[in-house]
Structures are given as structure tokens and as C-alpha cells.
Image (cartoon, helix red, strand yellow):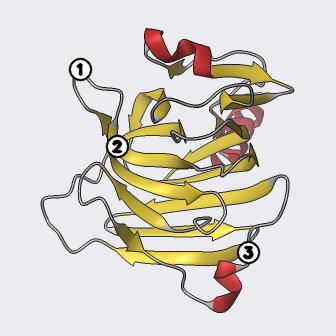
Amino acid sequence: MKLLVLCLLGASLAAGQSLFDGKTLKGWSVQEKEAWMWKVKDGAIVGGSLEKKVPHNTFITTEKRYKDFELTLQVKVEGEKPNAGIQIRSERIKDHHEMIGYQADVGPGWWGKLYDESRRRKVMGNWVSKEAAKAAREGWNDYKIRCEGKRIRLWINDILTCDYTEKDESIPLEGYIALQAHSGPPFEASYRKIVIKEL
């Protein structure tokens, strides 16, 4: 019996841990004044609004911090000029709606790039190939993010889009994971099947 339990536990750890139960926002944190911009719909965490303008960037974060990991999830965006992202190794800025840290980008022209949100405010890891620039499609996209030490890699639909190694020794290699809906015209960003495997 002990062996069976250990085997099941080992298989569970190898497969990773779900960060979203598909029904509630348990395990996630959002600022009270931004709660109207986040909900669970059709088995996904949905940020933004299709009815009105998204006034500023908004984030929903994990309650736990992570360092080295592989994160897999499915993402889709819809609406006018949709723009979103997945924060990794990030922190909330005190008394502000913004976060600071790496962002795996989401949206037309941005899918699979690595942006440095509220810090260097620029793309740190661009597409690695012509195939990477065309990796995203309409509807749901498979996103994989792997952080190992200073190296961060991104995949969209099993196509490697970004391979970035941090050179700045002052940049933290640990922090929260968060889902973002960017400011702008009415749109929604949906996230589901969110699984993390700590390395």
C-alpha cells in the first residue's frame, strides 16, 4: 500500500500541480477595486471586459511564489486590439495596480515574446525564428513557460518562440505568477488548464 501511495505521489509531482480548479478563484489574489475585471467563465479565468474599456492593466496573482518551474496553460484573447500576458517571477508594486517583472506576452504581434513589465519596459526576448512569429492561432493556444536559473524559454503550440538568458545579476529569479489583462478597448483574455511543475 505504501508503495502504491508513493508511486501515485511521484506520478502527481511529475505531472505537475493544477493552479486553477476550473470553478473558483481559490489560490488566486486580485485587488478589491479590480475584482469586477476578473471572473470564472466556462472553465477559464477571464480578465477584462467585452462591454467596456479596460481602464488600466489589471492582474490576478498566485498566492505562492515560484522560482524554477515549468508552467503550461491554454490562453485565448478576443475583442478589439486584445493585449494580455502571463507574469512570472514578478511582484506587485506597493499601492499601485501594476506589477513588476517578466511577462510572457499574449496578443497579436506579441504572442511568445518576453517583456519586462514596469522595470526595463522593453522586450527582452524576441522571436527566435520566422516560425515563432506565426506560432499563435485564433482561439485557444497552448503556452509553455520554463524558468531554469537565469534562462527563460517560451513555447506557443509546441513551437519555441523565445530563449532568453538574464545577464543582469540584480534581477530577482523568484516571484509570483500572475495573469494580465492590458488596458485598452473592450476585450477579454481567458486562461485555463493552468498547471505548474516546480523544478
Task: Give me the disc on residue 90.
Answer: 2
Give the amino acid at mark 1. Answer: Asp
Task: Give me the disc on residue 135.
Answer: 3
In terms of depth relative to the viewer, which is nearer, 193 or 183? 183
**What residue does disc 1 label?**
95
Left or right: 11 as drawn, with respect to 26: right
Residue at (28% x, 54% y) in the render: 173
When asked about the image quadrant of residue 106, the answer is bottom right
Question: Could you say where residue 48 lies in the image, as x and y percent from the top left?
Answer: 63, 31
| Element class at badge 3 | loop
Residue 68 in sight in this render: no
Give the amino acid at mark 2. Answer: Ser
Residue at (87% x, 26% y) in the render: 42
Give the amino acid at mark 3. Answer: Ala
User: In terms of sequence position, does the residue under pointer 2 or pointer 1 come before the other?
Assistant: 2
Question: Could you say where residue 191 lies in the image, as x and y percent from the top left?
Answer: 70, 39
Compared with 53, 88 (above or below) is below
User: In terms of sequence position, does the residue under pointer 3 or pointer 1 come before the other?
Assistant: 1
Residue 181 in sight in this render: yes
